[in-house]
Image: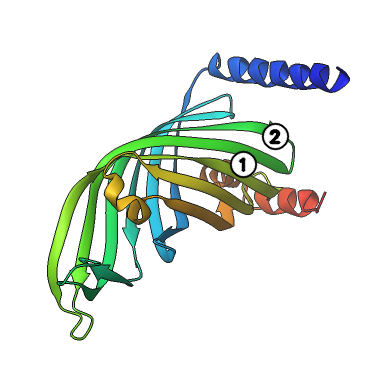
Amino acid sequence: MIFQAQAQSEFKSLCDTFLCAVKKKPSLTGYLDGRRSFVNSFPANVFGIFGGVNYGKRLDVGLAYYTTAFSTPYDVTINKGTAFEYKALRKITFEYLAIKADYTFYKTKHWEFSVPISIGRGNGHIYNYHTDTNKLYNYTDLKVMPLEMGVTGIYLFYDWIGLSSGLSYRLNLTNWQYFNEFTALSYTAGVSVRFGTLWRHVKKGPTHWYKGFRGACCLF
């Protein structure tokens, strides 16, 4: 009963924080978004750009555009189990426009945790190559509708720079016969730089950002 009461209290606090954020005056925001994903267990980089509005430094809502790059070709069997069975190399690419929301549910001086969720619509491309010559012999274009959600954590050395990592799952809601091609886990790990915040520090003086960084840089 005590655990249930604590859970209800935490949930109420989370709802109150969310409602308080959406009541704040929105401000414009934007960022670049890159992640490491998989296509049929083979690595593929996904790059994106986001633009929208921020409510109370807690909630981002807007549009994002994502596209693949440097996808790794992998072996597939065409017409498996028939007299026309043969091996081929396959490469998958896609690009789509998505409606995205990213809510920061935990926020301290140095730590932030958020839940991003998006749903998009775009195009997927399946390229098949001969295994011996690596020449393209056919391709398929189709519509994709990725639904993606996950969790992201950031440790901030200062309010404009930190380390970030995240894990998300992308589920394609169309073309189930190509489930493995467009549905996969994605992960991120790298440096997070908030150029807007940095610029505000620089405008206050050439050494303002450095002094603040030196005074605030700690592990806990």
Amino acid type, label 2: Lys
Q: For this view, does 102 lie left or right of residue 84?
A: right
Q: Label 1, on which residue? A: 204
Q: Is residue 15 above or below residue 109?
A: above
> In the picture, which quadrant includes the N terminus?
top right
Q: Position of residue 108 (x, y in %)?
A: 74, 36
Give SS at disc 1.
Answer: loop
Q: Position of residue 153 (x, y in %)?
A: 64, 46
Q: Position of residue 38 (x, y in %)?
A: 43, 60
91 and 166: which is toward the camera: 91
Question: Looking at the rendered structure, which numbered label has been put on residue 77?
Answer: none
Residue 7: quadrant of the picture: top right
197 and 168: which is toward the camera: 168
Most distant residue in the left direction = 137
Identify the residue at image location x=75%, y=17%: 8
Q: For this view, does 80 lie left or right of residue 70?
A: left
Most distant residue in the right direction = 2
Q: Is residue 120 visible?
A: yes
- The mark closer to the camera, 1 or 2, is 2
Amino acid type, label 1: Lys
177 and 168: which is toward the camera: 177
Question: Looking at the rendered structure, which numbered label has been put on residue 107?
Answer: 2
The numbered mark, 1 or 2, whose residue comes first in the sequence reads 2
Q: Position of residue 208 (x, y in %)?
A: 68, 48
Q: Is residue 208 visible?
A: no
Identify the residue at image location x=20%, y=80%: 134
Q: Is residue 164 above or below residue 80?
A: above
Packing grade of label 2 (10 A; few <14, some 14-19, many >=20) is few
Identify the residue at image location x=82%, y=16%: 5
Packing grade of label 1 (10 A; few <14, some 14-19, many >=20) is few
Total numbered badges shown on the rendered structure:
2
Identify the residue at image location x=39%, y=61%: 40
